[in-house]
Image (tube, rainbow, N blue to C red):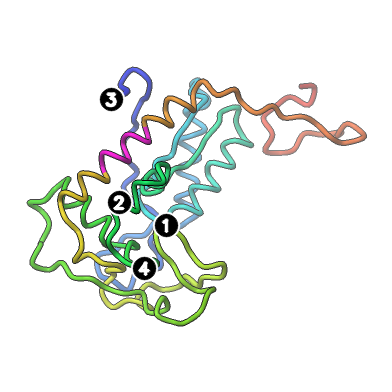
Amino acid sequence: RALANKILVLPTLQYGYTGHVMDFPGTINTHYETFIRQVIDVTQSLAYHGFKKIILLNGHGSNMPNLDLAARRTNLETDAECTVIAWWNLLTVDKTFLPSWRESKFPGGCSHACELETSLYLYLDEDNVRKDLIQSGTISFNNEDNAYNWVDLFGAGPATVISWTSSYSDTGVLGDAAKATKEKGERAYVEAAKQLCGYVNYFPPRPKDARKSLQRQPPSFRIPWDQRSIDD
């Protein structure tokens, strides 16, 4: 709404990569190859129709590796530029925001159905939040005393093992949901929207990075995923 004359918002892709959560009833998973292929089908179609600046706005952590690959492939296989943004990372642009907002411990307090996500849900749809069931949860391996294997929405150890969610949580609540408030949700929403608008203002006019060939001898055939002519 803030930038209605600058951005076209497509319908949300409702199902993503959640295979690791299948031990929790009700989970619906999209195979990672299906998910990536669907996203690339969309971005390639947009590029074909003339949209050359594409933002993938993500709301699910485990989609990120898949969306990163989809964006990279879009950039290599079309003449468009595509980038992926996790909405919560927009809260890190202003370095003063999270320190003034977050009360939960780091790492782990903001991970899944946590202080941040529960706050946002309370702001967006409070009537459908079962507030009597809100309780904090922990990621069991975050309690290990090591510098390598830990995770949070805003960081992870250099060698973090991400396997079946049920292996490190009995509830799927990963973080301090009890610290969530509607007011915090509103602040996070407004800040994320503001920073997304900032990126939308920056991205379209930014000149595209120019590719150049650095081989000593010109290649004799086109890379299969390169849509340029061999003479370009």
Residue name at image x 22 percent, y 50 percent: 120
**Which callout, 3 or 1, points at the residue further toward the start of the chain?**
3
Residue name at image x 29 percent, y 64 percent: 104
Q: On the image, numbered disc 4 is attached to which residue?
A: 108
Residue name at image x 50 percent, y 38 percent: 83
Q: On the image, numbered disc 2 is attached to which residue?
A: 100
**Which callout, 1 or 4, points at the residue further toward the start of the chain?**
4
Q: Check if mark 2's residue and mark 4's residue have beta carbons within 8 Å.
A: no
**Which callout, 2 or 3, points at the residue further toward the start of the chain?**
3
Q: On the image, numbered disc 3 is attached to which residue?
A: 2
| Furthest residue toward bottom | 145
Q: In this view, does 214 lie to the left or right of 207?
A: right
Label 1 neighbour load within 10 Å: few <14, some 14-19, many 20+: some
Distance between the alpha carbons at the discs numbered 3 and 1 = 27 Å
Give the amino acid type for the residue marked by disc 3 in the picture.
Answer: Ala
Q: Check if mark 1's residue and mark 4's residue have beta carbons within 8 Å.
A: no
**SS label for mark 3:** loop
Q: On the image, numbered disc 1 is attached to which residue?
A: 154
Front one among 77 and 190: 190
Residue name at image x 37 percent, y 35 percent: 196
